[in-house]
Every structure is written in C-alpha cells, then in structure tokens.
Amino acid sequence: MLREQAERQTAPLYVCPCCLNPVRGSVFTVANLPWSTFPLSGVECPVTKLEVAFCSVCGHYFQPDIDNNKLEFIYRHIYAESPWMAGDYASEIYRRPFMELFQRQPGAGPDAALLEIGCGDPEHLRPFARMGYRCFGIDPSPMASSPDLGEKISIIKGYLEESTFNQPVDVIILRSCLEHLGKLSSILRRCHSLLKPGGLIYLQVPNNGFTLTHRPPLFASHEHLHYFTRQSLGCLLSRNGFEPVEDNGDAEPSLISCWAKGPDWTAKNAFFWERENLIESQLHTFLAEWSRPVFYGYGMAFNWLLAKIDLRKYDFLIADDTSTFHGKTAPGTAVAVLPLSKCRTEEPGRAVLICASVMYHNQMLAKVRNQLPQTPVFGITSEGIVPLWEKK
Ligand SMILES: [Zn+2]
C-alpha cells in the first residue's frame, strides 16, 4: 500500500484537457492493444500498450501521451479499410439523431457558410448543401476529394491547424471528430475565431458516460484520444467561449450538442496585454520626468510586473511595510525588499516599487506620503499608470 502511494506521488502530472484539473499519472494501462478496431486485409496490425488517464472532477478519460506517428499510421493505412468512413455506414444510429437536432435550430439564412471539420467523404456535406448552405469540408483523408461536388461544396485537404482557411462561417460541425484530436482547446479557439457573431457549432462525440453504464471490460482505442462525458464536454466548450444552446442529454450513445459563439476571451486577454505594454511605456515616461517616483498598488500582479520590466535597467527599489518580507528577495529578481523608511535616502535607486495592494492596504498610501513626503506617487491600475497625488 505504501509502495503504491509512493509510486503515485512520483507519477507524472497531467492536466485535464477539459476542466484543467491536475491529474496524477494514468488510471489504467492496456499492455497489448491492437491498433485497429476492425478486421484488416491489406496491412499488418501493430499491437502496443495504451495508457489512459482520468479526471475525477469532470469524469473525462484521455490519453496523456499522444504518439503522432502511430496516429498517422492508423489514419493512412488502417483507416483505408475502415467501415466507419464508407458512405452511410450506421447512418441510422449516428447521422439521424444529429440531423434531427441540427434541423430543430433555425437555419442561418440563404447562402450561409458551413464548415465541417473532419468531413471524411464529401458526400456527407450534400444534405447541408441541399438546405442552402455554402459548404466547406476539411479533412486529411484520401477520401476528402471528389471531382464533381457542384459549386456549393468545397473541400480543403489537410488539417485545420495547418491550413490557412480563414473564411468566416455561420456554422461549424464536428461529427465523430473531436475525440480524435490532440489539442482540443486550440481547435476550439480556431473555431471561435472562424465563426461569425452569433455563429453556431454542432458537435457529436461518443458518450463515454453512456458507454460505462454498459460495463464494458474496456472502452479505449488507440485513435480515440478523448472519452467525453456530458460534463467534461461542457467544461471544454464553456472554457473556450461557447454558450450552450441545445443538447441531447446524457442517455444516448452519442453526445450531440449545439453551442453559440459567446464572449471572445482572447479579446479580453488582449485587453490585459495592451495594459501591460501601456504600463511599460508609461514607466519610461514617468522615470524620465520625475526624480525617484513611487509606483504603488499592483498587489498580486507584483510577480507579473517584475518579470515584465528589466529591474536593473530601471534601478528600482522594492518596498513593503510587511516586516517579514524585509531582506527577502522579490520573486523573479535579485532585489531585496526594503522597509519604506529605507527608501527615503539611504538606498541608491531611481524609483521605488511598493508591493502592497490597494485592495487590502487602503492605509498604505497615507504611510507612503508620511514616509516619503517629497515623492510623487503613481498608482499602477487597469487604466495604466495614474498620479495619486494632488499637484500643487
Ligand atoms: Zn476534468
């Protein structure tokens, strides 16, 4: 028992790709698993081990180590004989519930653009073309080309991540595709940026929650990198800026859902990047204008700012009124934290940074004014650097 615990503690740390919960080690390893899930005639089937990790927070199972060479072999050589790729295989159990949910949503209007990622046989796009959509399909498989598709259907052969496709679309579809993809968040962010405002994304993935209720001895295969539950899929989509519209619940073999493009988190992040650049350019200006100014009030953003600015270049002193910090090194620097009183004249330096946050130390500004009466004090805020004193 103790040995097991010790092994567990030294197992590698992974991150759940859906909810970002840390996951320690794999939950099971299959020693010998064939690379194909169907009989083959033209190619020998390798047999290797498969590791699967589990997130206890959202119920997601996933392959923690992805072998791209193995996947390349499976898709290039084994999938050439796949029954799943051919025509309308299993259209009743897979395609029909998807189309029912799809058609319950209002259409996107005449000539709306639709992209199916991992479309496989371009024939799969024909029902959408008949509904009036201008269809784009992207897929690396040899099936993803056909000479006579009509002007409503265009096929891009390859992977979305590697393509320069940037046509804004109204609808994106991923059917039996997401569970095969390694970088879930990056593909969903790409989808988010391709969708027009109000655009919709439709997903269909195997429902591992449903699979597990049938108590199979094994549910994993080499080409499925992800095993979604309704919860893990929800975490993934909402974390990447999508809002739920409709889904088929938890009791079917497939999770089928529709999501609307929501707030653009990357734009929100850009806001902070802009502030960061603004703050650095303002530091230059204020340091040129004032002798030994005090910059105050960034609290938790302390480490971030210290990493951003070159302290040696600016010759900063770092001060705090918390006595247990005095003499210790500020994170990411070689600079020791000083008491405020020391910053007056004893120490050389062009400017003083105060570590404390305005949120918790509202008396701090008064202390700074008291200890450093001749010094201009600037606040570091989300609006950039602003003066915190009355000009005389
Ligand atoms: Zn998770």
Image (spheres, rainbow, N blue to C red):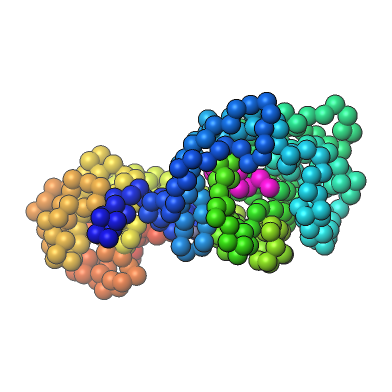
Q: Residue at x 90, y 46 (%)?
A: 130
10, 46: nearer the viewer: 46
Q: Say whether residue 72 is left or right of residue 345.
A: right
260, 366: nearer the viewer: 260
Range of magenta residues = 176-183
Residue 181 on the magenta span: yes
- Percent x, y for residue 348? 13, 47
* Displayed quadrant of residue 129: top right
- Percent x, y for residue 16? 47, 54
Residue 373 on the magenta span: no
35, 273: nearer the viewer: 35
374, 37: nearer the viewer: 37
Q: Residue at x 32, y 68 (%)?
A: 358
* Residue 305 visible at all: no
- Percent x, y for residue 371? 17, 65
Q: Say whether residue 136 is left or right of residue 282.
A: right
Q: Residue at x 66, y 45 (%)?
A: 177
